[in-house]
Image: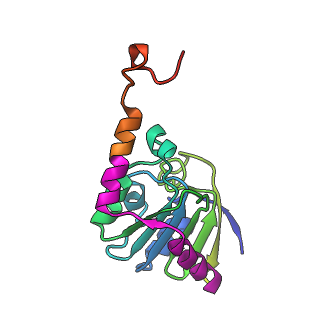
Amino acid sequence: YEIYQCDWSSDVCSSDLLSKGVTRVSVATGYIKKGKLSEANLLVPGNTKIFTRWRLSDLATGASDLKAYEEVRDAGGRFFINHRLHAKIFLLDNTVVIGSANATFSGLITKPGAGNLEAAVLLDADEEITEFFRDLESFSVELDDKLYEEICNEIAAFEAPSAALPGGNRMPG
């Protein structure tokens, strides 16, 4: 294997893999931003699975986007939540990219010289990777519109100013 300094704009991490006509994508990422998957050509209509941690704090602080679910759902993909997830694994058919990048604008760079300096290894997918995603799916909660609405309401309540505190601040000073 080789270790690559990896921005998603390079032909190592994007063009070479995705120009082959990827038919199946599974992504495990701690954080996810709306628009990043489509910008990086990682949404395969009807055959994309996204796994992310989506903690309330991640959503409230903007580390992850609520609207990422809608993007995946609208492309016919499936979206899973696992609050313990910290992996960064991108399975593109039979190629796996394992690295440090989240599915964010700082992680999956599509413009050279922007964002974080990430690293990744590209490997042929094997049964262990397939089993990892199978296990991850069984230990995760699949998001649907009803649960999504509940989470949106939780975030709205979390972000709403508290009437009990002067100035509407939840925390002092």
Q: Answer yes or no: is residue 63 visible.
A: no
x and y percentages locating residue 151 in the rendered image: 37, 50
Question: In percent of the image, x 57 and y 81: which residue is there?
Answer: 130
The outermost residue toward the front is 164
Q: Nearer the viewer, residue 67 or 138?
A: 138
Image position of 43 with respect to 129: above or below: above
Q: Answer yes or no: is residue 132 visible.
A: yes
Question: In percent of the image, x 27 and y 64: which residue is there?
Answer: 74
Is residue 98 toward the left or the right of residue 80 in the image? right
The outermost residue toward the bottom is 127
- Find out whether residue 91 is within the magenta segment: no
The picture quadrant where one finds residue 169 is top left
x and y percentages locating residue 19 in the rendered image: 43, 75
Tell me which segment is drawn in magenta: 127-152
Q: Nearer the viewer, residue 7 or 132?
A: 132
The picture quadrant where one finds residue 135 is bottom right
Image position of 30 with respect to 131: above or below: above
Q: Quadrant of the N terminus?
A: bottom right
Q: Nearer the viewer, residue 90 or 119?
A: 90
x and y percentages locating residue 6 in the rendered image: 60, 59
